[in-house]
Amino acid sequence: MKLTTKMIDIATREVLLNNEDARNIGVLAGDRVQIFNQTNGVSVAAFVDTTTSIISQGTVGIYRITNERLGVMEGESVEVRLADRPVSLQYIRKKMDGARLSKDETYSIIRDVVDDNLTPAELTAYITASYIHALDMDEVEHLTKAMVDTGERLTFHTHPIVDKHSIGGVPGNKITLLVVPILAASGLKIPKTSSRAITGAGGTADLMEVLAPVEFSAAEVQKMTLKVGGAIVWGGATNIAPADDRIILQEYPFRIDARGQMLASVMAKKYAVGADLVVIDIPVGTHAKVPNVQDGGKLAREFIELGERLNMRVECALTYGDSPVGRSIGPNLEVREALSILEGGEGPGSLIQKSIAIAGIALEMSGKAPRGGGSALANQILKNGEAHKKFMEIIEIQGGNARVKSTDILPGKYEFVVNAPASGYVVEMNNQSLISLARSAGAPHDRGAGILLHAKKGNRVEKGEPIFTIFAERNWRLQKAVEEGRRLMPVLVEGMLLDRVPHETKWE
Amino acid sequence: MKLTTKMIDIATREVLLNNEDARNIGVLAGDRVQIFNQTNGVSVAAFVDTTTSIISQGTVGIYRITNERLGVMEGESVEVRLADRPVSLQYIRKKMDGARLSKDETYSIIRDVVDDNLTPAELTAYITASYIHALDMDEVEHLTKAMVDTGERLTFHTHPIVDKHSIGGVPGNKITLLVVPILAASGLKIPKTSSRAITGAGGTADLMEVLAPVEFSAAEVQKMTLKVGGAIVWGGATNIAPADDRIILQEYPFRIDARGQMLASVMAKKYAVGADLVVIDIPVGTHAKVPNVQDGGKLAREFIELGERLNMRVECALTYGDSPVGRSIGPNLEVREALSILEGGEGPGSLIQKSIAIAGIALEMSGKAPRGGGSALANQILKNGEAHKKFMEIIEIQGGNARVKSTDILPGKYEFVVNAPASGYVVEMNNQSLISLARSAGAPHDRGAGILLHAKKGNRVEKGEPIFTIFAERNWRLQKAVEEGRRLMPVLVEGMLLDRVPHETKWE
């Protein structure tokens, strides 16, 4: 059916049809139509909303995101038809039925994900089926390559290209802000794409954005890396492995991180930036994603095998994941802590040790340091100021202020100090609760929101001494976090009263 | 955040926020907010769309479906907050992980489905997980009861109440139009709720709508049944087991019909209308939903067991499902065929035999006929005109024309006759292809579209004799169906050339 376009400033990938036109085309609200722009030959799929008044018969409302690819002008006419059922739905069904998917089938699904031909519900069915019927290594390899081939890539003519990744789950893990400058200062090239927080209190991209812009195209990342040796950008803006971002978004409501998809997700991003050497940080602990060293070792071997299939050398570091890294959680607090260490200030041992250990592995893999000498070299680069100098270059090339000092970065002005209710040792520090608290206080959106830990697991505290401070930019956020803190009790001191059970007679 | 409402005539359950307000609330497009109408105390969840221009800061656009429950007036203010994550997501995750769900957990999910607290993607995850980790009979029972308890019910004070259901998959299965009048004419009560076609060429509700309105509330269905003994209505309008309709809609893209959900779906509807005696028609055949008698028997035993748990007596009929029932597919053609039989005209044996067999089982179960004498009684009621008289009463009470004749119901004016390309026996008749063809021709939306079969499986046809006719209301639809017919070849005559493979040398 030929319809005249009317632009509608709503940020979704939909179109708005008059009820009558929808009926004639044979679609209901939520169905998929194909829209042809005969002027430029472009055709896109979009989902249908219906109205009886906003759009009259003969007109189609084109929402903003739909027009990003369609590119029609208001008043031009387009052809609107019932869309064919995407062929990839058959393959999703096949996965639901427990079958292995071939390379072509996986590519078909991922292409439809990137082209927005699948509804969130259809993509969720694929994710759920792949979560339950775990992907084998062939399927993971195909998924990784499909994610890479449907997005942008970097191509470097000098080698090696180094990359690092942490699989996450530990709050305060700002080590990228130290590792990238150390490696770039050593002469290696590390084009680091990072994520924004989805479930966390601040992804590396959220942290870096405190200091400089982080949204760059793939080509810009390549150029900056060639110039100063490294960059720390938000992966979402580069269009590198875009299918992965969509998959992660759909996994979010269920808090799942399916093994196969996680392997593919991490390695697609490394492969697409042209990495030769990759260090993967796998935090292990009761409150981390990987509960014990056995599982960590198994996951490490899978990363290594997948790396071999993709011609990347991978080494993994199992790290301590039962407590936050360093003493800060939340963008500004974490950036201040990292910056202060780069400036030569004192810093928490956990953060410095972990950073030079991870950087050290990459230095050894690349031959910059002898086997066993990596972390010493990393420490030297950190201590002699070269890493700091390099970080300032990176900040500058990304458009930030290269004269920034750690003392310039301030936490939110509202704070609440939590004191030890009893004397004793800190026996428990719950990652999930700390993250939840920092998020309640406003992190990562409010950059100044977060948590500063005054004591860590195993420390002795005296009654009335501060254990941690909650910071917020807005008072109601602070109140909300304080309330939640009372409920979650993220830090436990032995001898603390956990709960009081009132006397009550129960008949069952 | 307090915002002023503005009504927006778009038929979805969403709200439209200015980008800035969305950011302040802490949501992105696609996230869920909770909206409180302080005037009437109602609170509903809705999904967020964002705009930079249509809605200014301080205002929230309320879409039509959102306001059906919220009930605000334009210009009133509402409180909009980030919605809590529905607790039922945890249970969906639990099912993804392969665990059995408790009664409470199942109720929590189904309540959120009915209250629209889950996104289509979240519901799809539940469906996919339940498809892969098949529900056990306890879970099916809980699901059935949850579906019943979250919707309307009928309560009859006279018994027995009879019901029938066909699990579908066979085109042309218009037997309800014969079975309901036969049973009602016998003095039994049968409040039949039916579905519209989702994947088929016409659901029973689509057929009945040719003759009378089919959208009634549960209370109206009860009243009509008490008055004339039966009704044939669209279940969707009754709000009986509304969760089921939403589940079916999400299953549609994958063409799945998960065993547990199917059992619950069928039996919830029978339970909710207060049925005591239920006959289930299970078509068996290569192209039907159930491929063989063994599987049919197993499914039958599950229906019977579930019936026992719900205090309903269930009998199942395994029927021949490899060919269409009767000779017509598509609303008008099917209605004409059924009406003609009721009027005492000649009709295909397959349709008459199946109808009196199914009606006969119910007559025996209710004691109206002795064991073994049900189909004879059904045939008598059909032949002596009582069924026809009863059907006219049903049509009349539903608001249709009680003087309608089969000859009044006409197929679409565009037709294309497919002739036998060779002499021989009809060896194959593909249900799926026939349905697909009828849909291409416009069924069920175009009531006159469909297929009339002149020969059936096993019949001998001579070269040039008509095998079937395609009817359509619009010429382009007819052309599309003819094209598809060439490709699908739904009816095969032995000796027909299936395909011609051109000579071609291939190097592999």
Image (spheres, coloured by chain):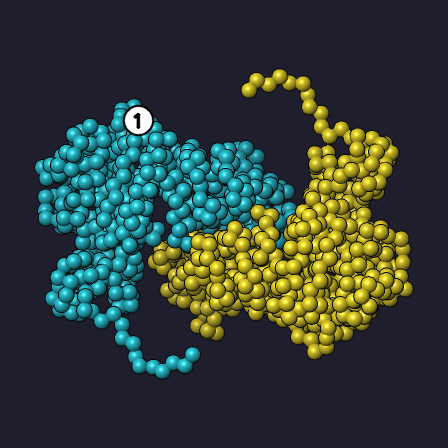
Chain colours: A cyan, B yellow
For the point 81% across and 47% down, which residue is it?
B327
Above or below, B219 against B452 in this view is below
Give x and y (percent) for residue A212: 24, 43
Give x and y (percent) for residue A38: 57, 35
Report the side of B193 relative to A203 (left or right): right
Write down the residue under mark 1: A156
For the point 54% across and 63% down, which residue is it?
B138
Above or below, A437 against B252 in this view is below
* Residue A299 in which image quadrant: top left
Q: Is residue B93 visible?
A: yes
* Residue B398 in which image quadrant: bottom right
How many numbered circles does the render carry? 1
| A4 or A301, nearer to the observer | A301
Report the side of B167 relative to A4 (left or right): right
| A211 or A429, nearer to the observer | A429
Give x and y (percent) for residue A376: 13, 36
Give x and y (percent) for residue A182: 18, 36
Q: Residues within 10 Å of mark 1 (few under 14, many from 20)?
A: some
Going by the numbered disc 1, the residue's amino acid type is Phe
For the point 81% across and 59% down, which residue is it?
B356
Report the side of B331 relative to B71 (left or right): right
Q: Is residue A61 visible?
A: no
Report the side of B446 relative to A275 (left or right): right
Q: Secondary structure at mark 1?
A: loop
| A332 or B196, nearer to the observer | B196
For the point 44% across and 72% down, which residue is it?
B38
Instruction: Pick the quarter of the image with the C terminus of chain A.
Output: bottom left
Name the chain letter of the residue that bears numbered label 1. A
